[in-house]
Image: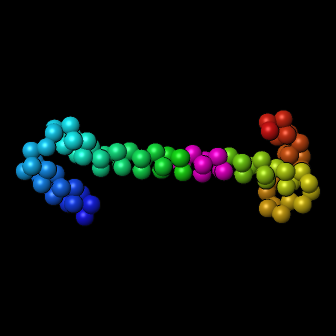
């Protein structure tokens, strides 16, 4: 729908014979929106990866405190992995 609107607008501008730079700028506008959308998706993926990278350290802290609610690993493994944090 949005693309169809842009095509109609470009067709009208071609009839008016406006400056070529204005036509070029308007024709590139959907590509700029796509570029911004891709950048936003990249930021979301990076944020999700950062959250996933924090999960093992939170799990190790949980086991280190002795609660072990998640039930993975043993306190002995925590002592070995503390040097990585």
83 to 8, vertically: above or below: above
Render colour scheme: rainbow
Is residue 67 rendered to the left or right of residue 18? right
Where, quadrant-wise, is the C terminus in this rendering? Answer: top right
Look at the image and tell me whether residue 82 can be seen.
yes
Left or right of 52, for residue 33: left
User: Residue 71 or 29: which is nearer the viewer?
Assistant: 29
Image quarter where the N terminus lies is bottom left
Q: Residue at x 48, y 50 (%)?
A: 41
Q: x%, y% of residue 17?
A: 9, 44
Q: Quadrant of residue 67?
A: bottom right
Relative to the observer, which residue lies in front, 84 or 27?
Answer: 27
Task: Identify the residue shown where x is 79% and y is 53%.
Answer: 59
Q: What residue do we see at 30% from left, 50% from top?
A: 30
Residue 74 visible from this viewpoint:
no
* Magenta span includes 31: no
Magenta-colored span? 45-52
Q: Is residue 50 magenta?
A: yes
The rendered magenta stretch, by its main secondary structure, is classed as helix
Above or below for 46 versus 69: above
């Amino acid at each position: 729908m949005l693309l169809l609107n842009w095509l109609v607008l470009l067709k009208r501008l071609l009839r008016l014979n406006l400056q070529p730079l204005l036509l070029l700028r308007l024709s590139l506008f959907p590509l700029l929106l796509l570029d911004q959308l891709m950048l936003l998706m990249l930021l979301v993926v990076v944020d999700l990866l950062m959250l996933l990278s924090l999960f093992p350290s939170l799990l190790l802290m949980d086991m280190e405190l002795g609660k072990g609610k998640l039930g993975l690993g043993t306190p002995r493994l925590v002592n070995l992995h503390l040097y990585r944090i």
